[in-house]
Image: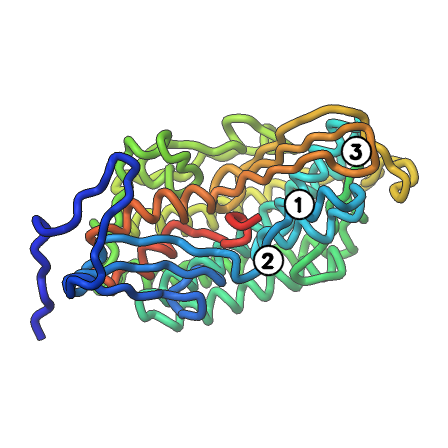
Amino acid sequence: MTHYQPDRSQYPQAKDDGSLDIDLTSGKYLKLWQGPQHPGITGNMSVELTVCGDEVVKGRTHVGYLHRGFEKLMERRTFIQCFPLVCRICVPEPDFNEYCYAAAIEELAGIEVPERAHWIRTLILEMGRINSYMMYMGGQSGSLGMGVIGQWTTYVRDLMLDRFEELTGARIYHMFILPGGVRDGLPEGFAGRMEETLREVERTMQDVYDVMFCNAIYKKRTKGVGVIDRDLIDRYGVTGPNARACGVAKDVRRDQPYLKYAELDFEPVTGKDSDIYTRSDVRRRDVLMSIDLIRQIMGKIPDKGPVMSKLPNVLHWKIPHGETYIRGECSRGEYGFYVVTDGSGYPRRINVRGPSYTHAMTLLEKMIVNVNIADVAGLMVSLHTYPPEIER
């Protein structure tokens, strides 16, 4: 079957504000919805597609089908009551929200975090990064019809969840990083079990490389597709693997070290082609770097020492007037919390800077134009977005 090739000269021209006047009654264009319940959608979101033949001429992102409104919810809760909320802003990598929120409160309240707690926090964030990448890798392969990869990566993600469970008591929402430190130290024998998990992740990633990245069909569907122009990096606030795949070595862990990253040996993983294939390969190599970082961390964590500073009565806790912005490098790029306090027992204002906002809204809607319908899912997943970061 020969696909209909639209005459692009007849496409509607964008206005100065980027909007398009499209007459759906003309018969040239058709509106389709991809999501929210669709296997090629990142989480509970949807993309409103306007197509001409099998080519997209316009796309709009719609979110709000899942968790939402976190920022206003937190303004109506005490500081300690916000912790069950923040981890839900990013379900596959919840610990990063815990860290950013805790670090912001610590800075505003003048709380010192013990050395050992800093190391454990660094460990938790790298464990969460691997979990997030495992979910992404299964989604990226699944968007192009390679379902077995998702089964493999879900298996090793479950092994890492075992480590989270014995460390925090929970598998998904851990609420382990609190203001002042962490809730507990490492359980006995944890280092050995962690090493077994890391070896299994390494073996699985080798299988993923052989079956997915060396696959001729995967290469043909992803190489040269969904290229991000290097000029868009700063204009659109592109960060993380999406920027590093362009050769822009942005990584907050190295550029503005926090926790114990300044004491670890690593260099940001980069690529040069900036297409779907390169973005997925940067993330694959990022997993291997996280494995190395965890091994470095496990060799440096003190065996003894406090993991939590003494706090006031958290039920009547009032934070002095102030404001701060805490940032870090999550699996999708720069993540940040802007927190304002007014001396009361409630946050005055909280704004969450999740990379999904720029990647799934402004960037995706620009890149999706002239893309074939069959490539929409692969393109969208390659930007690695989590909808609650947008509708927060």
Q: Do the numbered discs 1 and 3 sit on residues whose CB atoms are within 8 Å?
A: no
The residue carrying pointer 1 sits among few (fewer than 14), some (14 to 19) or many (20 or more) residues within 10 Å by Cα, namely some
Q: Is residue 306 above or below residue 279?
A: above
Q: Is residue 389 left or right of residue 45?
A: right
Of labels 1 and 2, earlier in sequence is 2
- Circle 1: element type: helix
Residue 59 location, quadrant: bottom left
Which residue occupies the foreground of this view, 110 or 235? Answer: 235
Residue 220 seen in render: no
Tag 2: residue type?
His
The residue that label 1 is drawn on is 72
The residue that label 3 is drawn on is 114
Of labels 2 and 3, earlier in sequence is 2
Disc sitting over residue 67 in the figure: 2
**Quadrant including the N terminus:** bottom left
Residue 270 location (% of width, % of height): 36, 38
Residue 223 location (% of width, % of height): 22, 52
Tag 3: residue type?
Pro
Of labels 1 and 3, earlier in sequence is 1
Q: How many marks?
A: 3
